[in-house]
Amino acid sequence: MRSRKKPEYQVRIAKERIHILFKEAEKMVRKDRALANRYIKLARKIGMRYNVRLGKDLKRKVCKYCKAFLYPGVTSQTRVKKGCVKVKCSHCGKTSHYPLNNR
């Protein structure tokens, strides 16, 4: 069975919807964390359906382990140490490490 590419207009609409859902999640994270996590779940589902990758900036806003929305100071703790950024999820307690770019 061959996989066919989605039409370009559908991919463009999917990207727009993903960005809108992430913006809405940022607005709702202080009021209702469950709703913010639901928005992220929907954005990931749209990305998988239309084979659209989340960019690096969006991917770092989602916990790798529990797929919860990470918002600094509200749902995550961010630390900068020795050339890397450590982000701890307050939902599952796992820590992700990201390198710092020295420009």
Image: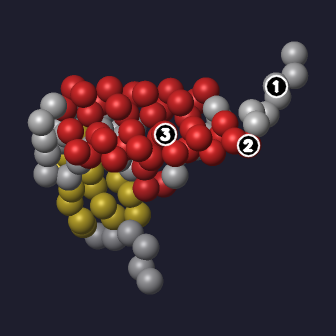
SS at badge 1? loop
Residue at image point 48% right, 54% down: 56
The residue lying toward the viewer, choosing from 23 and 77, is 23
Residue 73 x/y as whole percent: 13, 51
Residue at image point 29% right, 30% down: 37
Asked if one can make out residue 94 in the rendered structure from this viewpoint, the answer is no
> Left of 55 or right of it: where is 66?
left
Tell me the amino acid under the disc marked 1.
Answer: Ser
Label 2 packing within 10 angstroms: few (<14), some (14-19), many (20+): few
In 3D space, how far apart are the residues under numbered discs 2 and 3 (Cα atoms)? 14 Å
> Left of 55 or right of it: where is 37?
left
> Which residue position is annotated with label 1?
3
Image colouring: secondary structure
Residue at image point 21% right, 39% down: 28
> Which residue position is annotated with label 2?
8
Q: Nearer the viewer, mark 1 or mark 2?
A: 2
Any mark on residue 17, and which? 3
- Determine the image quadrant of residue 101: bottom left
Above or below: residue 47 compared with residue 100: above
Residue 45 x/y as whole percent: 50, 27
- Determine the image quadrant of residue 86: bottom left
Residue 61 x/y as whole percent: 35, 47
Q: Furthest-right residue in view?
A: 2
> Left of 90 or right of it: where is 46?
right
The residue lying toward the viewer, choosing from 88 and 39, is 39
The residue lying toward the viewer, choosing from 102 and 38, is 38
Tell me the amino acid under the disc marked 3.
Answer: Arg
Give the quarter of the figure containing the C terminus. Answer: bottom left
